[in-house]
Image (spheres, rainbow, N blue to C red):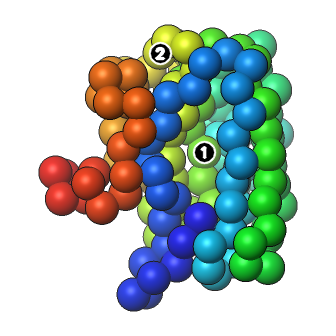
Amino acid sequence: MVTKNHQSYFDPIGLFVDPGGTISFVMESGNHSATAYHKQYGLAEETRIPKSAEPFDSGVIIEQGDTFEHTFNTKGTYDYYCIPHKTMRMIARIVVGEPGGPAEGSMPPDGSVPTSQQIVNKGTIGYEQFKQNN
């Protein structure tokens, strides 16, 4: 989770993980959250994680170097955002095992992320790499 040159973003913006994998969201700079697009969270207009998946929300993290971890047990596509920077299009996608669920076939309402197939093919897609190609 990064703020640099007046831009806030997740890096990587696309990540593949096997089921049961744990992701550490690390605060590099700024004030950020990692929050699943799930209707239980007030800013999410729609749910964009697999139906049986556990939603996640780090809350706003403000200290550089602090982390939030989440274990992804359910296969599918997970879109997530930063609470303070959602309107600035700070969003990203994780594919667990294989694409699937309500996030497939469309982009999040707040911007663009790599397609699930791009993520599966490459494993990791960095923010700068994605922005250069889009």
Q: Earlier in the sequence, mark 2 or mark 1?
A: 1
**What residue is at 78 percent from the left and 31 percent from the top?**
71
Q: Residues within 10 Å of mark 1 (few under 14, many from 20)?
A: many
Which element is circle 1 on?
A: strand
Q: Position of residue 22 (x, y in %)?
A: 74, 33
Q: Position of residue 109 (x, y in %)?
A: 46, 46
Name the side, left or right, on which 128 lies relative to 108. left
Amino acid, disc 1: Tyr
Above/below status of 98 relative to 25: above
* Quarter where residue 28 is shown: bottom right
Q: Position of residue 69 (x, y in %)?
A: 80, 46
Q: Position of residue 78 (x, y in %)?
A: 59, 31
Mark carried by residue 26: none
Tell me the distance, in whole angstroms, between the alpha carbons under discs 2 and 1. 15 Å
Amino acid, disc 2: Pro
Q: Identify residue for label 2.
A: 99
Q: Residues within 10 Å of mark 2 (few under 14, many from 20)?
A: many
* Quarter where residue 17 is shown: top right
Above/below status of 14 relative to 120: below
Name the side, left or right, on which 84 lies relative to 97. right
Name the side, left or right, on which 69 lies relative to 93. right
Mark yes or no: residue 87 visible: no
Q: Residue furthest left?
A: 133
**What residue is at 48 percent from the left and 57 percent from the top?**
11
Which element is circle 2 on?
A: loop
Mark yes or no: residue 64 visible: yes
Q: Identify residue for label 1.
A: 80
